[in-house]
């Protein structure tokens, strides 16, 4: 594993429930488009890689697909098993998954490439387990992001918080542009054909306290930043957040947070 993979394991250990209540709801926005891109339908043998709290698995099963799922975090595996009883959900991590060559008609990974140290190797592995003529569809967060994506980072910066030294980034030689063209080029480099990439934009609606709850509990890299200076740092960032989030507040009191993701798909 790369240093980034190691830090990702540390970030997500034991945080499945907090993720499901907060960022899991955000990530569910892209599920319909992701499954459409994978041509998921009745009878499709589909693997949900990085299944998280199970939103993709449940939606694919709802389409009649024959779904299996895998995640590196045991808590996420347990959450998906609860959400989708009867689905085969296993522990496994990229770039080595516990499935034979050509096992699936479609493989999907919703925001998973954001969390692996060698994205190209991960896509090559997804290609290995997909049959000839099958489809692979993936999403990542677009960079630069939309204003809603930057809100909590802005609050942390205003509070003087800095990224913890142990929190690694993807090595430059393994990174790629987080744009439709950049993600599409990565799929092409992995050997996929008929590659297409696009941006997906939406406003995520949430109560201000609910949106803060995720990073405050340490979810994702942003949660590690918010907690980098202990309770005093969290409180300082929260004061900044309370001011900044007003710019996104609607008449109903909920935040409308603009987000933008990249969806790319291709054929084996």
Image (tube, grey):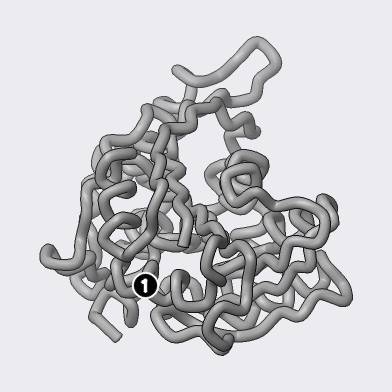
Q: Residue furthest left?
A: 173
| Residue drawn 79% across the image and 67% down it | 66
Could one spot residue 237 in this view of the protein?
yes
| Residue drawn 48% across the image and 81% down it | 93
Q: Residue furthest top?
A: 251
| Residue drawn 47% across the image and 55% down it | 267
- Where is residue 86? Give x, y as percent: 87, 76
- Where is residue 144? Give x, y as percent: 27, 36
Quarter of the figure with residue 239: top left
Quarter of the figure with residue 243: top left
| Residue drawn 74% across the image and 61% down it | 44
Q: How many marks?
A: 1
Could one spot residue 232 in this view of the protein?
no
Question: Which of 214 and 87 lies nearest the eye of the viewer?
Answer: 87
Taking 118 as reference, is 66 left or right?
right
Judged from the image, the secondary structure of the residue bearing numbered disc 1 is: helix
Q: Which residue is label 1 attached to?
A: 124
- Where is residue 80? Give x, y as percent: 73, 70
Taking 106 as reference, is 157 left or right?
left
Question: Which of 158 and 37 lies nearest the eye of the viewer?
Answer: 37
Q: In the rendered image of this protein, does residue 70 appear above or below residue 26?
A: below
Quarter holding the N terminus is bottom left
Q: In the rendered image of this protein, does residue 77 appear above or below residue 115?
A: below
Q: In the rendered image of this protein, does residue 17 appear above or below residue 205?
A: below
Question: Which of 154 and 90 lies nearest the eye of the viewer?
Answer: 90
Which class describes the residues within 10 Å of circle 1: few (<14), some (14-19), or many (20+)? some
């Amino acid at each position: 594993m790369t240093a980034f993979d190691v830090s990702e394991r540390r970030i997500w250990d034991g945080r499945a429930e907090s993720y499901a209540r907060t960022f899991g709801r955000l990530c569910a926005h892209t599920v319909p488009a992701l499954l459409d891109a994978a041509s998921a339908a009745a009878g499709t043998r589909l693997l949900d890689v990085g299944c998280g709290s199970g939103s993709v698995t449940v939606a694919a099963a709802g389409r009649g697909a024959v779904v299996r799922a895998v995640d590196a975090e045991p808590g996420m595996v347990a959450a998906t098993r609860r959400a989708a009883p009867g689905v085969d959900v296993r522990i496994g991590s990229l770039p080595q998954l516990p499935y034979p060559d050509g096992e699936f008609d479609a493989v999907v990974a919703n925001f998973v490439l954001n969390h692996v140290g060698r994205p190209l190797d991960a896509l090559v592995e997804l290609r290995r387990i997909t049959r000839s003529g099958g489809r692979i569809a993936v999403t990542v967060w677009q960079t630069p992001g939309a204003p809603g994506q930057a809100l909590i980072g802005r609050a942390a910066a205003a509070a003087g918080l800095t990224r913890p030294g142990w929190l690694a980034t993807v090595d430059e030689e393994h990174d790629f542009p987080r744009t439709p063209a950049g993600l599409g080029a990565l799929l092409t480099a992995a050997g996929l054909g008929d590659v297409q990439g696009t941006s997906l934009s939406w406003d995520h609606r949430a109560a201000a306290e609910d949106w803060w709850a995720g990073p405050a509990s340490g979810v994702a890299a942003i949660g590690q930043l918010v907690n980098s200076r202990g309770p005093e740092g969290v409180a300082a960032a929260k004061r900044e957040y309370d001011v900044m989030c007003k710019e996104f507040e609607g008449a109903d009191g909920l935040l409308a947070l603009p987000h933008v993701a990249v969806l790319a798909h291709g054929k084996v």
